[in-house]
Image (spheres, coloured by chain):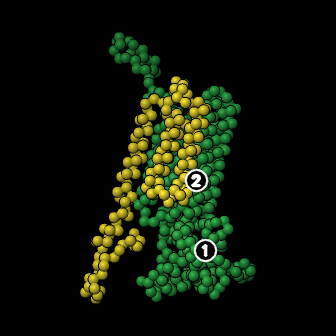
Chain colours: A green, B yellow
Amino acid sequence: MSDDHKSDHQDSGHGHSPMFEYQPALPISIGKTFMWLFLSTEIMFFAALIGTYIVLRFGAVNWPSTHDVHLAEIWGATNTFVLICSSVTIVLALEAAKKNLASAAKGWMVLTFALGAVFLGIKMFEYNAKFSHSLFPIYPHSQIYEKADVYYAQAVRKRLNGLKADLENTTERTEAQNEQLTLIDSISLDYVVPAEKAIREDPESPAGRILLLKMADAIYPRASVHEHHAGIRHAAAQSSKFKLISTGSEAAAGHLQGLNDQYHWLKLPIMIPGGNMWVSTYFLLTGFHALHVVVGLIVFALLLRMTLGTSKAGLIENIGLYWHFVDLVWIFLFPLLYLF
Amino acid sequence: MTNETSHNDHQGHGSTGLYVTVFVALCILTSMSFLTYFDFWRERVPVGVSRAFMMAVSCCKAMLVITFFMHLKWEANWKWVLTVPASLLAIVLMLVLVPDVGLRMRHASYTRMIHAAEVSPEVSGDHPKEPHDADHSST
């Protein structure tokens, strides 16, 4: 059809309409153009998320310290290093492919894939650290209260009563279950009942609030509180009728152990000021980033099935651009989440 | 190094040596940002300076990745069309939210405090109270 048009133009007049040559918009391949356009949409996506995080975090009333929420900077730094290494290896894969060294390119690509998998492995380890301390992004698993107030005490009481009812309804209780029942009673008597009583009798006095805070601390000790008050022992543990194994003391691993840590079946509601906003933003940012890493790994797996010669250099370049972008996002996420 | 970069510019891409150099620079920058984790840093350096330092380190790392690994050093002027608006968007988007959301807790307490309702003495039956400090309210 275009041929007919050409002949029409030539017949209608001498140079009446000049023949236009198709010019590409940019002096790069279509694939590369589209990858860059896609990356600019991704930049907007992550800019929105990161910008929102910055604003919410600095505008928040309270924000948990990194150690309160079991965030270890060493793993963040390790992940940063792993992603930087994977960026280098994919660049080297590209260089090898351009020189038509297919096996070298494949080797570098395998290394990139492995490093990406290591990143995801460390991320899963970190997520597990959060989940095991009942830090979940959504209800109903998330039982984070912002303040140690009467509603928090009520939630703890309800959980204890629920556990107690389940145990009492079990016809044949094992030794372990009997111990659990004893523990529930002791927690109730040592922490929940005195706190609720104090706040009920004298709502204005700080005594009730202090007992509520001590209860919250016994369940989930916050590192930021204990660094400040190093060496102060909790009076409540000493005045109990029941023998409680040292609550709120340092464990051998150097991280504070509360009731939820010592008895994993308890799963009592925890109190972290600013905790809910923290879990939402942390899991959103790292979750979306991890999703992007997974997509990258899937594409690597597909690439590894091909022979990575010069003909594939353009493809590797474009995938490399995506992977560098993923690295870039992490470079910004790491200080914002771990170091601020 | 200058010989290498001018040779690379002529070629249109970097040598392996250049990429390894960039990698080493990135590692150094990462360990610099990790310095802020230690106690001596926290005691000596003000928080604002610390944060500015970390953002500067992140921007340097980002520039290294973008320029060399993503190859933009050797690309034509179209790179500005893509990078400049996107960067402006990222910065401006954050800045527009700062007055309303970012500075929320700076003045909210004071404003609430001066406008908080007071129980009139006739109703409460005693001396007029001080305006409540709104700091410990939940919102």
Residue A247 lies in quadrant: bottom right
What is the quadrant of residue A301 in the picture?
top right
Image coordinates of residue A199 in percent, x first then y, are 47, 84
Q: Chain of mark 1?
A: A
Give the amino acid at mark 2.
Answer: Gly
Q: CA distance from mark 2 to mark 1?
A: 27 Å
Q: Earlier in the sequence, mark 2 or mark 1?
A: 2
Q: Residues within 10 Å of mark 2 (few under 14, many from 20)?
A: many
Q: Position of residue A335 (x, y in %)?
A: 51, 52
Label 1: how many residues lie within 10 Å, few (<14), some (14-19) or many (20+)?
many
Is residue A81 positioned above or below B129 on the image?
above
Residue A127 visible: yes
- Is residue B95 depicted above or below B112 in this figure? above
Q: Residue at x 45, y 57 (%)?
A: B47
Q: Which mark is residue A76?
A: 2
Nearer to us in this view, A276 or A305:
A276
Relative image position of residue B1 (x, y in whole percent): 55, 30
Residue where numbered disc 1 is placed: A248
